[in-house]
Image: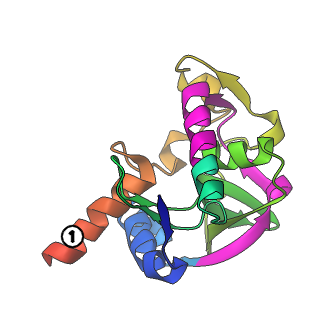
């Protein structure tokens, strides 16, 4: 069962996790909660993994079964696995939104026919996307892990927003919450 968590409860923790992972320029950026048109969302990922896309589709089903708007922040109650589920996060570049985290969830929502989605949006003095972007409709799907040159196009590694190797942004948020509760800040 999923239980809704207020976006403002997790917003400061997500902002702190982003700033810790990529201090310049995220430390000076703002993070706001928006409902966005999915058709306006772009991705750096050009080829998604089918296993992750299916998992995102199952998660979408859990949100719908719990009568929650996908993908509002939520806590998984009484189930194994991570307990906190954060929404997708995108950067604002003029009138474009480019996903930093949540490509598979956003793609699952798009393929399910959803027209809008709630997510956090990073705004500020941000460098442009670190590679070519594409519409969600243009993302291919692969059953195998693809090399970075296939998943991304014209990627500039030095500008790539790494959201962590252990659990992506959700893992970074869990680590950040641990720092806050352990008083290590």
Residue 15 visible in the displayed image: yes
Q: Picture quarter containing residue 13? A: bottom left
Residue lying farthest to the top in this orientation: 144
Closest to the observer: 127 or 182? 182
Q: Nearer the viewer, residue 68 or 129?
A: 68
Residue 33 coordinates in the image, percent (x, y): 63, 76
Q: Residue at x 55, y 27 (%)?
A: 51
Q: Secondary structure at mark 1?
A: helix
Residue at left offset 41%, top offset 55%: 170
Q: Residue at x 63, y 49 (%)?
A: 60
Lateral position of residue 22 relative to residue 48, left or right: left
Q: Please report the bounds of the magenta region as a residue range.
A: 32-59
Percent position of residue 157, x then y? 51, 40
Mark 1 nearby-residue class (10 Å; few <14, some 14–19, many ≥20): few
Coloring scheme of the render? rainbow
Residue 102 seen in render: no
29 shown above or below 146: below
Q: Is residue 50 left or right of residue 167?
A: right
| Residue 86, horizontal then vertical, whole percent | 49, 62
Q: Which residue is mark 1?
A: 179
């Amino acid at each position: 069962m999923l239980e809704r968590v207020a976006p403002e409860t997790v917003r400061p923790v997500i902002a702190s996790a982003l700033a810790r992972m990529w201090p310049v320029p995220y430390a000076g950026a703002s993070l706001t909660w928006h409902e966005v048109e999915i058709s306006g969302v772009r991705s750096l990922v050009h080829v998604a993994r089918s296993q992750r896309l299916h998992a995102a589709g199952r998660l979408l089903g859990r949100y719908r079964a719990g009568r929650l708007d996908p993908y509002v922040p939520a806590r998984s109650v009484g189930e194994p696995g991570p307990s906190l589920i954060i929404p997708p996060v995108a950067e604002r570049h003029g009138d474009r939104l480019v996903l930093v985290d949540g490509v598979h969830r956003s793609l699952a929502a798009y393929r399910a026919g959803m027209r809008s989605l709630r997510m956090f949006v990073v705004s500020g003095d941000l460098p442009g996307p670190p590679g070519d972007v594409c519409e969600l409709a243009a993302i291919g799907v692969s059953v195998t892990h693809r090399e970075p040159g296939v998943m991304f196009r014209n990627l500039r590694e030095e500008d790539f927003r790494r959201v962590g190797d252990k659990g992506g942004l959700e893992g970074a948020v869990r680590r950040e919450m641990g720092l806050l509760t352990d008083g290590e800040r």
